[in-house]
Image: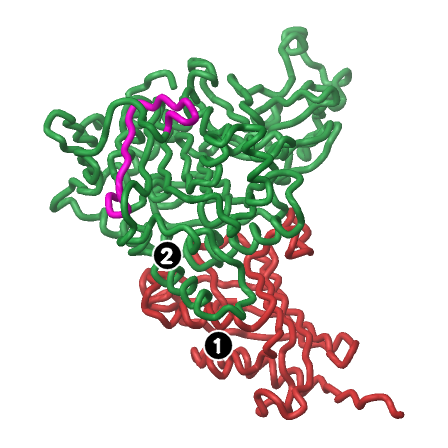
Chain colours: A red, B green
Amino acid sequence: MTAPHVAELTERDAERLLFREARLLDNGDWDAWLALYTEDSTFWMPAWRNEAETTGDPDRELSLIYYAGRRGIEERVWRARSGLSVASTPRPRVVHAVTNVLLEGEAGGEWAVSACFTVHLYDPRSGGVHVNFGRYDYRLRHGNGNGDGGNGGWLIAAKTITLLNDRIPTVVDFYSV
Amino acid sequence: MDFNTLIDDRPADGLFRVHRAIFDDAEVFEAELARVFGGGWVFLGLADQAAGPHDFFTTRIGRVPVLVSRDGDGSLAAFVNSCPHKGSMLAQTACGNARLHVCPYHSWTFDSAGRNKAVKWKNAGGYSPAFAQTGHDLASLPRFGEYRGFLFGSLSADVPTLEDHLGEARKLLDLVAGQSEQGMELVPGMVTFTFDANWKLQLENCSDAYHFTSAHPSYLRVLERRREDPTTVTARSAWDSNRNWAEDAQGVQGGSFSMAHGHVLNWGVMGVSDAMPLFESADALATRVGTGARDWMFNMRNLTIFPNLQIAENASSQLRVIQPISAGRTEMRTWCIAPKGESAEARRQRIRQYEDFFNPSGMATPDDTVSYENCQRGYASRVDPWLQGYNRGATESRAGGNAFGDTIGLVPERSVAGGSQLGDETLFHGYYREWQRRMAGAAA
């Protein structure tokens, strides 16, 4: 028996997927955004334990957002579109800039990828401008024909968002980090 | 400005109105910092935030930086977090452990009891004998006290005892502190957010039953969608199993208690439900504190200890500290407060419920804070300066307690009980009567 074939992720593949995700969030194309995630994907933005460390165990420590399963971000998308949330209407205009994309290795068929982000945000209601910035850590998995086909078949199995400036002006949501 | 004229309080006429200026006037705000925050008891933190010898945490009273430190013998004390030498802030972090606090500017050194241990190059310093005779210790807060792990301080010495200040509200803190024999703790992970609105909007919103179905329908619909899809991976909600907020709910669904010194509770009936992490302790609590207090621990309770502590036990359990920054800007420091020793599964459930509802990245709090900002914009008007949000419940408010509070022996100044559509607003009167008292310079 031969070992199962592990699809090879290139840095260019990773960049394409991350840049595409950024563009979909900026455009508010959230159905296409959700399709980048596996059904069992983890979406995690830890809180900070102190000045230097984020929380590390979502079951014993607080997170800003933690969903084990795509269902969680599907709910968030539903809420943001519902017209029932004043915080989500009108929505801020956002632009995600994703840089410093690095392959961090492969384990169990999933590739670890890290990147940096800045999200510039303009709130038309107040005229206020803000920048959220931090790091992304992904685990990417090849869909083998399942899921979104537009990324060389690569899907997001886990995304961790480390928000460095966590004194949050009023609200932060999935589309603004 | 005569601050008294900003509250139109006419109980005989059944009218209570608040002037918009109390929310956006800079002179009012400066007076609040001096008299409300600087002139009376203010919540500092939990004793558990400095649990071990030499542990410390920092906070502020208004703009004044405060250091709470436990010394080597286990005694807690609170100091102005400012070196007596040049005034530099001493402790730099939110919390930590330090036998010695060394000022980063000129290296004056203090122990964990605030005593000066070193003035750098003292003997060579050419100090006069008079200087040597003045004290160099950290300035203690004029008043500091603890009630069941809740720490309070005052920048003014002219205040009643902490016991008097808390009064009947102690029985409501007991319902928090008593949930575990080991006491309460803050789940690691502090969340700080700001909003561009006055601090009293937060004070009111916590006590505002009227806004819930208007401001949070997206959250309530998400709960409905979860119920329709049992494969959900997300947490069950206490709001879902207890529908005291629903407009078709029958009978008394909740109410409010107003206590002396501006402390206020609004509450809703919630049964002893397995949707709540405390459920695992329901039987043990009934034995230890009695079924009356136990059932109250399961009720939805939003408690304000005036002026800056709120403990919200509804969708989960949150401890909030309100930090006013300016008339139009407020900082909130928030934590998930939880009984020590609860099971891993209960803790996980509590944290998931908390993140859903309370975080500035959650599905409910942002709809509150954005509404505060909308109010703050509206306050710019003086066309009709008097706000009308203080009059629901006028005919239902009773002097003294009621049968619901009797089960924990609560004797409030006023109480209200009613159906889900009552949305009492008379409990805000307690805030503004105390505000008026402190703004008039009364010892508080």
x 49%, y 73%: residue = A74
Determine whether, in the image, residue B160 is placed left or right of residue A165: left
| Front in this rendered view, residue B261 or B340 | B340
Quadrant containing the C terminus of chain B in the rendered view: top left
Start and end of the magenta stretch? B405-423
| Front in this rendered view, residue A170 or B46 | B46
x 48%, y 43%: residue = B272
The residue identified by callout 1 is A25
Place residue B13 in its image quadrant: top left
User: Is residue B334 located in the magenta-colored stretch of the structure?
Assistant: no
Mark 2: which amino acid? Asp
Chain name for mark 2: B
Chain name for mark 1: A
Q: Secondary structure at mark 1?
A: helix
Q: Position of residue B25 (x, y in %)?
A: 27, 39
x 33%, y 40%: residue = B254
| Front in this rendered view, residue B33 or B370 | B370
Q: Is residue B25 above or below residue B236?
A: above
Q: Position of residue A11 (x, y in %)?
A: 71, 84
Mark 1: which amino acid? Leu
Q: Position of residue A116 (x, y in %)?
A: 63, 70
Quadrant containing the N terminus of chain B in the rendered view: top left
Please identify the dominant SS of the magenta region.
loop
Determine crowd level at label 2: few under 14, some 14-19, many 20+ residues with C-alpha closer than 10 A: many
Q: Position of residue B16 (x, y in %)?
A: 18, 33
x 44%, y 72%: residue = A77
| Front in this rendered view, residue A99 or A170 | A170
Instruction: Please tell me whether mark 1 or mark 2 is closer to you in this view.
Output: 2
Determine whether, in the image, residue B337 is placed left or right of residue B114: left
Numbered tag placed on residue A133 in the rendering: none
How many marks do you count on the picture?
A: 2
The residue identified by callout 2 is B367
